[in-house]
Amino acid sequence: MTRTPATDKRSAFWTPVVKGGAALALGLATFLGSAQTVKETASLAPLAGPAPAHASASSLRITYAARLAGVRIGTGVLSANLDGTRYTATMSARTSSVGRLVSQGQGEAVSRGVFGRSLAVPVSYDLSASEEDLTNVVRMRLSRGDIAELSAEPPLSEHPNRVAVRAQHRRDVVDPVSALLMPVPNAESAMGPAACDRTIPLFDGRQRYDLALSFVRMEQIQFGNGQAAVCRLRYRPIAGHRSNRRVNQELAANTNIFVWLSQVGDAALVAPVRMEVGLNFGTLSIQALDFAAQ
């Protein structure tokens, strides 16, 4: 398959809630592509200090469907093995071609790490993706949230308006799959403002951005314990993006992005069951079809 320089199109590669409607096609991770085997190269040493307990759930599987303006454009599956404070999470997805908005693609991303007090702390992230004539392969190894090894093929194209990714942008970061598993202080706080109130420092191998979540309300849902925290999500570009691109500016100004987070079993952990992004040509929605935590 032909490789082309990575541009800000990357319509099927999540850039989680980033890069406009097409970029959010299965907007819950930077995950499209063929299967990638994770090499277990990093040790899983828990962070110093107390961390929430997560052993009450040992596995998670969520199936999603994505729709753009009411048209189904893709499906995805988030699965995770949970072992105390350790996790291995996989996001796989497939999108269908919808005119010029969404390209046909498929892929998988795998992340391993430990849970900190408010964020997952990954030690590895592997993505392999394909979208028509574009391939996307990212490999990251991390140490306590800092990038220790990184390869991303193809690299971002050079552009005078691209904000440079510097050493400080590769510290204290979370990968797109680990970002889907969100620890809370205790099981009770999974059903309240603490489920939302966080800023996720995301790095996808090429770009660094924050996803800032804030609590809006609780809502009844059909999964799990029957409740979800509804969070407003704001995108804040930091590095790797092109500062003059209108899609970045519009997305940063968009106040109509919401995510629904539900408790994983009875653990001190939440995961997304729904997302909506209001766009000028319609709403992108990503809805869980089933949610199984054991």
Image (cartoon, rainbow, N blue to C red):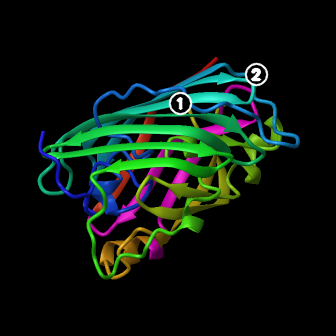
Figure label count? 2
SS of the residue under disc 1: strand
Rendered image quadrant of residue 241: bottom left
Q: Return the residue nearer the eye: 139 or 231.
A: 139
Res 174 visible? no
Which residue shows up at 74% across the image and 41% down it?
A: 190
- Residue holding disc 2: 56
Res 111 visible? yes
Q: Quadrant of the N terminus?
A: top left
Rendered image quadrant of residue 5: bottom left
Judge left or right: residue 238 versus residue 108: right
Which residue shows up at 69% across the image and 46% down it?
A: 144
Looking at the rendered structure, the kind of residue marked 2 is Ser
Residue 272 is one of the magenta-drawn residues: yes
SS of the residue under disc 2: loop
Residue 123 is one of the magenta-drawn residues: no
Query: Where's residue 240, x and y in %?
Result: 41, 68
Query: Where's residue 152, x and y in %?
Result: 36, 50
> In the rendered structure, which segment of residues is drawn in magenta?
252-281
Up/down of 18 relative to 218, above or below: below
Mark nearer the viewer, 2 or 1: 1
Looking at the rendered structure, the kind of residue marked 1 is Ala
Crowd around label 1: few <14 · some 14–19 · many ≥20 (10 Å): many
Query: Where's residue 221, x and y in %?
Result: 58, 37
Crowd around label 2: few <14 · some 14–19 · many ≥20 (10 Å): some
Which residue shows up at 64% across the image and 32% down it?
A: 226
Query: Where's residue 19, x and y in %?
Result: 35, 63
Q: Earlier in the sequence, mark 2 or mark 1?
A: 2
Q: Quadrant of the C terminus?
A: top right
The mark found on residue 89 in the picture is: 1
